[in-house]
Image: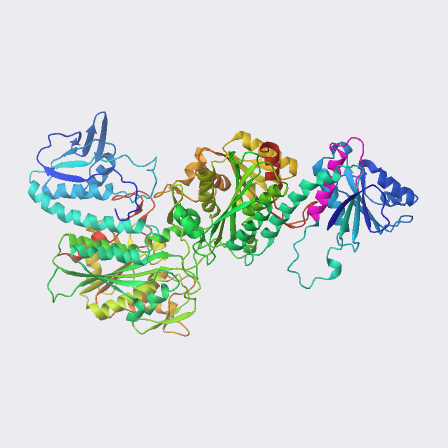
Amino acid sequence: MVFVCWTVWWPTITRIEFSPVCEDAATQVVAAKSSRLLASHLPQLVELAKAKPRAQGAELAVLLRGCPSPAWVDLTLSAVQAVELAYGLILRAYRAPQIRSHDDDDAPLALPDRVVIRCADPVAAQAQWEMRQAIAQGVFLARDLITAPGNLLGPAELAAQAQALTALGVTVEVLNPAEHGLNLLAAVGQASTRPPCLVVMRWNGGMADEKPLVLVGKGITFDTGGISIKPADHMEEMKGDMGGAAAVVGALKAVALRGAKTQVVGVLAVAENMPGSGALRPGDIIRSHKGLTVEVVDTDAEGRLVLADALSWACATLKPRALVDAATLTGAVVRVLGRHHAGLYSNRDALAAKLLKLGRDEDEPLWRLPLSAACDDDFRSDVADWKNCGWGPVPDNDDAARFLQHFVSPGVPWAHLDIAGVSESDDEHAFGPKGAVGFGVRLFDALAGG
Amino acid sequence: MKISFAKPQLPDQGAVVVGVLENKVFTPTAQALDDLSQGGIKRALDASKFNGKKDQVLTILAPAGAKVSRVVLVGLGKAEAIDSQAAQSFGGTGLAQALTSGDTQVAIAVDAVPGLKIDEADFAANVAFGALLRSYRFDKYFTKEKKEDKPSVKKLAVLTAASGAKSAFAPLEAIAEGVFLTRDVVSEPANVIYPESLAAQCKALSELGVEVEILGEKQMKKLGMGSLLGVGQGSDRESQLVVMRWMGAKDKDAQPVAFIGKGVCFDTGGISIKPAGGMEDMKWDMAGAGAVIGAMKALAGRKAKSNVIGVVGLVENMPSGNAQRPGDVVTSMSGQTIEVINTDAEGRLVLADALWYTKETYKPKIMVDLATLTGAIIISLGGEHAGLFSNNDKLADSLTKAGSAVGESLWRLPMGDAYDKQLKSDIADMKNVGGREGGSITAAQFLKRFVGDVAWAHLDIAGTAWSKKDTATCAKGATAFGVRLLDRLVADHYED
């Protein structure tokens, strides 16, 4: 639970155990035939289709709703498989924070408090389980943050959530953008009464001389579009325009919780994009951290502005071994890839290939799209080095990625994930309920390794 | 305009308004004028299409034989159909013909014709009332208006043989004062009428014996009114909740009736901003509050023997760097949480806390709220009826009857659980919008969650608060819809 005002606690799984036996099972899950699983508790029988253990676990989370505790998963699984099943189970069992005076009448039925998974080697399973649980905690944090409405999670509150990771050994700094030449970030946040910030989270689990993996997240805690204001329909979804930052915070929590032996730095570009008497106007020209000037023709193309400064600052300050950013950046990427792949752009084939593979392994699929110099023509300005977007039928997702590339040092292996289509789900999905997915946490954790 | 009542005697100057019944049947005064002009009135009438149907008019200038500058014939229709509404219409229509004519005096002849539905004194009083209502004009900001375009009439004489006309008119005059206050505050632009200045208008009612209490943002915050406060948070203007108490019943502790008004002094839509075309109309998004304030003035003015509470939630809905965002979740005074999907569905957020506060503080017999709440009501009922929603059939019935009696028509629309489900939110107790379908109904369902078990009705007056054309008793502009209706409801059911 992230916020004190979350008033409803949903009874869910609080304990997962691995054991060769279970004496007091109230619900039993057994294999049915060779290809099916069966969960039963009188008078109910439910079947589970065959799949990979993680996906099976996720499906089990739905089947176990309303079943009494403890549930005994009586299957023949190796330690690795048992842990995978447990991992899928808790990822799917997550329910978003509720801000209610009384629970929803249509809330899903409660899950059993305790689940015991049959495993011949409980000690090995438990050790691996702690690693998985760490990552799941990171995923849940990301989901909670994305779900939080804009009035409860502004820039300061998001920074405070990052600062809370100091308890896990992460070093956190909150910088005032204007004091560090991050003028684009400052400009995007200038109309809001809640000032912008750059949050830097350092996990020093590796050797001191090891170059860090740097993860950068777009953290627009609410995006009205600013003076180029968005239409009212569905604007409430813009509370999730910090999905990239949430993934980075979640990933840092995951690596810290599992004590990863590697150097990772998370950088969040945090602002609230509001209209107001002090707002950035279309046509304003801003000198970026990199020194390049940008004509802001559309104040609603603000994500690339805050990321440009954050990437440029990261390259100059952190000497990354690799630099990966995640952002709910463009509506165009949703038209191109829909809701099942994030857009991947990279200046290194090896990094792109690695990310593609990890995305498949972690069920966070990516699809590579081109970084094209031809896009430069779309955002050449008459009065500045660049404008922040091209109007008309231009491939805005490609343009945005190419725009960012101008702010990344060519020597740094860099990848950009446009997660606008995958950060939230309109319906229940394989590993979670409707709403925030926490996309990127598992991928980033795997990329960090250690 | 000064109104006096006089014995029937044809004036020797100015304009005179006389009635003609259907099929060109002259009233006695019309006949007298025709006699004076040796049949000139009849000839003029025959030369026109005038037949005496209700509200038909024919103006005859300087008829021979009579000393008046003009004779205005107004159709009365059938004598047996003449009720107080028709009488007001007669007075208003007649006055309108002379209003800018250049004449400074107008006399309206009220003749007792056989078969009238109301007594003669009431007839005369309502003619005067109709004329008074029609004389209202919001012209304070015309600095260069030509003299000939300004209303010229300064004195109105109502000619009647009935001796009780003047005393029958007294309470109606008090109601007209209430109507005019409402029209004033609704017509004023948003730079003049904003939460604090409208609260000051309420405060002025204390001269009539109304107790007025004003809650500012600090007090509302203490009370937990997160729903109302969220709406006003983007504006530099401080939100206000004003409580007006008229304790006119013999027993000052008797359970009161309560009227609650939506007072969004300007509604830009906030971050879910409205398109620019027509946005200026949103200065009258406080017409519900305006009606409640006017009704309180009317009730106090005529010293109604009833305990009445008026509560208005006053805010300005603006976008800004501090404005409420779509998706924000707020906690209302009732403890229920609301996910604000669209900041332009703000009226219900204001009313939610105003209704709950009223219910908790005053335990009223009934609550009636008035609000320019939804555009959807204009689509369904147009400008002829306001939408009526209620959890109580008897109250709905009383309101409908009161409305018909004063010419402020209501039409009841359905409510039910199926509509209520449209307000389901993923993370809070409810959303503030329920989609396009049944938009006025889902708005009413939303309000219903804040009234508990109190008999309650909601009037959606978005289509009736402002008139795009002149009517018999109201010049184009603010109608003050609701003032007469609320006054009548009290008079019919809640007075000692």
Nearer to the camera, B483 or B267: B483
- Is residue B123 rendered magenta in the image? yes
- Name, please, the residue furthest toward the top: A43
Nearer to the camera, B31 or B455: B455
Q: Position of residue A302 (x, y in %)?
A: 36, 62
Left or right of B174? Residue A407 is left
Left or right of A357? Residue A303 is right
- Name, please, the residue furthest toward the right: B38
Asked if one can make out residue B446 in the rendered structure from this viewpoint, the answer is no
Q: Which colouring convention does the figure follow? A: rainbow
Image quadrant where residue A328 sits: bottom left
Q: Position of residue A14 (x, y in %)?
A: 19, 40
Image quadrant where residue B411 sits: top right
A44 versus B319 height, above or below: above
Asked if one can make out residue A6 in the rendered structure from this viewpoint, the answer is yes
Identify the residue at horizontal 69%, vertical 64% (top origin): B144
Q: Position of residue A301 (x, y in %)?
A: 38, 62
| Number of marks drawn | 0
Left or right of B336? Residue A257 is left
Left or right of B154? Residue B258 is left
Nearer to the camera, B258 or A76: B258
Q: Position of residue A424 (x, y in %)?
A: 31, 49
Identify the residue at horizontal 30%, vertical 67% (top origin): A177
- Is residue B361 rendered magenta in the image? no
Nearer to the camera, B335 or A436: B335
Q: Quadrant of the C terminus of chain B?
A: top right
Q: State the extent of the magenta-drawn residues as a range.
A: B109-134
